[in-house]
Image (cartoon, rainbow, N blue to C red):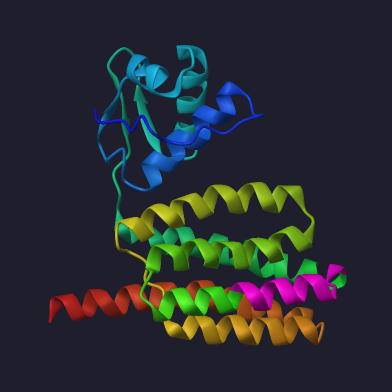
Amino acid sequence: MPIPLNHNKPVRISAKENAFNQLQQWITDGTLRPEEKLNDNELARALGVSRTPIRESLQLLEVQGFVEMFPGKATQVTKVKKEDIIDLLPPLAALQALSAELAVPNLNEEIIRNLEDTNERFSKAVHTEDYFLALKVDEEFHQIIVDAANNPYITSMVASLQAHVRRLFFHNSIVLTTYSIQQHDTIIDCLKKRDALLVSQLMRDNWLRAIEEFYSREDDDKE
């Protein structure tokens, strides 16, 4: 099981948080491959912690659907099924839409300016075909709105679902296009107008459009 040893170790967080964050990252970016068996001792040595926070982290990751634990046998990374996008994006779209609606009363010039600057960086990443950077900046854009909604329950659920989106991206189930740049611009305009209902619908459409693109690519591959 190849485990990077030169990763950055977060500071000022608990051993369990450190282990959980790092393991989730390795699973989402494919460092730990689908169906790869995980060894507690190897992971503990790689992260410089005891086996206890590793086990606790793996239990949390199992709840979130990233690993499977077979007591007395093995723990392994779950398979990646690109069709999961059909189950994943609708609830995420609903949460993002609600976030946009709840964010409207809390908006200020700084938040709007931050959204505009972030979408500019997103546009540059897409146009230069740096899709990994584009994914990260796209997450930043939506996180600004989630943070503005100021609802810890939404924040927690979005973070979990977003990690699965990131994993699907690395396994080529999600593609970012120039149309997303235009959608972001329209969302910003609606936020400026404080149109909560319209921005909610636009946000939902922004996420669900990825399902349409997925089916379109599937049809192209069959031809």
Taking the image as shown, residue 169 lies to the left or right of residue 116, namely left
The span picked out in magenta is 106-118
Compared with 152, 133 (above or below) is below
The x, y position of residue 139, in whole percent, is: 55, 62
Is 211 magenta? The answer is no
The x, y position of residue 191, in whole percent, is: 75, 80
Q: Quadrant of residue 105?
A: bottom right
Which residue is found at the position 46% from the left and 68% from the top? Answer: 134
Compared with 214, 188 (above or below) is below
Q: Where is the N terminus found, in terms of image quarters?
A: top left
Taking the image as shown, residue 71 lies to the left or right of residue 113, namely left
Q: Quadrant of residue 126?
A: bottom left
Q: Quadrant of residue 171?
A: bottom left
Which residue is found at the position 36% from the left and 75% from the top? Answer: 129
Is 113 magenta? The answer is yes
The x, y position of residue 166, in whole percent, is: 43, 55
Which residue is found at the position 32% from the left and 60% from the top? Answer: 83
What count of labels does the image hold? Answer: 0
Compared with 43, 123 (above or below) is below
Compared with 89, 192 (above or below) is below
Which residue is found at the position 65% from the left and 75% from the top? Answer: 117
Residue 60 visible to the viewer: no
Residue 124 visible to the viewer: yes
Q: Where is the C terminus found, in terms of image quarters?
A: bottom left
**What residue occupies the far left of the structure in this picture?**
223
Q: Would you say the magenta stretch is mainly helix, strand or loop?
A: helix
